[in-house]
Image: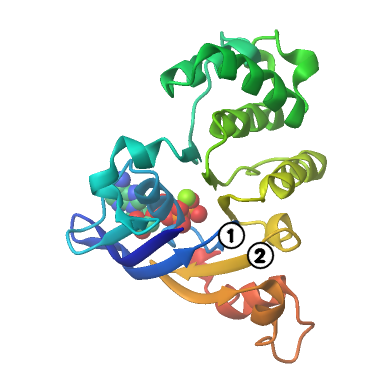
Amino acid sequence: MLEIQNLNKHYGRKPALCVFSFTFKNGIYGLLGPNGAGKSTLMNIISGNLYGDRDSRLLWNGNDISLLGKAYRSNIGFMPQQQSVYENFTARRFLMYIAALKGIKTKEALNDTEKLLKTVELSDVADKKIGSFSGGMKQRILIAQALLGNPQLVLLDEPTAGLDPKQRVIIRNVVRELSESKIIIISTHIVSDIENIADCIIIMKQGQIIASGSVGELCQSVQGEEKTLENLYMMHFGSDISNS
Ligand SMILES: Nc1ncnc2c1ncn2[C@@H]1O[C@H](COP(=O)(O)OP(=O)(O)OP(=O)(O)O)[C@@H](O)[C@H]1O
Ligand SMILES: [Mg+2]
């Protein structure tokens, strides 16, 4: 369980997260919100790559993550929004390399690598250089690296950005199959990526949660239109041209 209590984050004087509080239990969480809402900032703080302001508290199974250090970080698999790949590495070598960085033992790394290549449907190109991959294939190898070591907390920041519908479906299926006994947080701008797989949707605006709940619960508030997540999103952001 991950508890976030009063998380504030400023970049200089500019607020990016404002008293963000939420408790994540096992399941799939979809983070929705326009550009600048604070999704990546939140993921970077959860992953330990950034710190919140002084009064913020993050608890992992009841313990402060700043005291847990490596014992917390070893539970995390993170796919950042802008992550570069090693173009000259083959897919297999890249996963083995990241596994080594994560401190995963060779035998487990070999097992995980083969299993994950299969999961993300890249086994047949495992020995091809990543530089020759399409955007969707690169995204999938980046998802695979996040899953090395079977982390309990998986953070995927816009894993489907720029992908065609078929690639998005592959990624959606990978996420769907992960969900047991894990916390999976996935940010996206594409409502259809998460509306059928997320147990809970969190809608963010200007660093705050403006709505959260299951798709069914959230869509109840849509008035005068079909009760879909897309209409809910438009209800909150449709008129906000600066954020479209
Ligand atoms: N390194 C930084 N320095 C200064 N301001 C930043 C930095 N990173 C983010 N911000 C600001 O913090 C706010 C939240 O940004 P963040 O990247 O977390 O949003 P986001 O929801 O991930 O947006 P997007 O959908 O575009 O990825 C924005 O106003 C952004 O300009
Ligand atoms: Mg972002």
Q: Is residue 5 found left or right of 116 in the rendered image?
A: left
Q: Residues within 10 Å of mark 2 (few under 14, many from 20)?
A: some
N-terminal of the pair, mark 1 or mark 2, is 1
Name the residue beneath numbered marker 1: 29
Residue 233 spot, x, y in % from top left:
63, 73
Kindly identify the residue that appears in the image at 76 percent across and 14 percent down. Answer: 125
Which one is nearer the viewer's eye here, 183 or 128? 183
Q: Are marks 1 and 2 in contact (CB under 8 Å)?
A: yes
Q: Which mark is residue 102?
A: none
Residue 237 spot, x, y in % from top left:
56, 74
Above or below, 154 against 145 in this view is below
Residue 36 visible in this rendered orientation of the protein: no
Distance CA(mark 1)–CA(mark 2): 6 Å
Residue 154 spot, x, y in % from top left:
54, 44
Q: State the residue lying farthest toward the bottom.
A: 224
Q: Residues within 10 Å of mark 1 (few under 14, many from 20)?
A: many
Q: Is residue 128 found left or right of 202 in the rendered image?
A: right
Q: Secondary structure at mark 2?
A: loop
Name the residue beneath numbered marker 2: 199
Kindly identify the residue that appears in the image at 45 percent across and 70 percent down. Answer: 205
Q: Secondary structure at mark 1?
A: strand
Which one is nearer the viewer's eye here, 209 or 113? 113
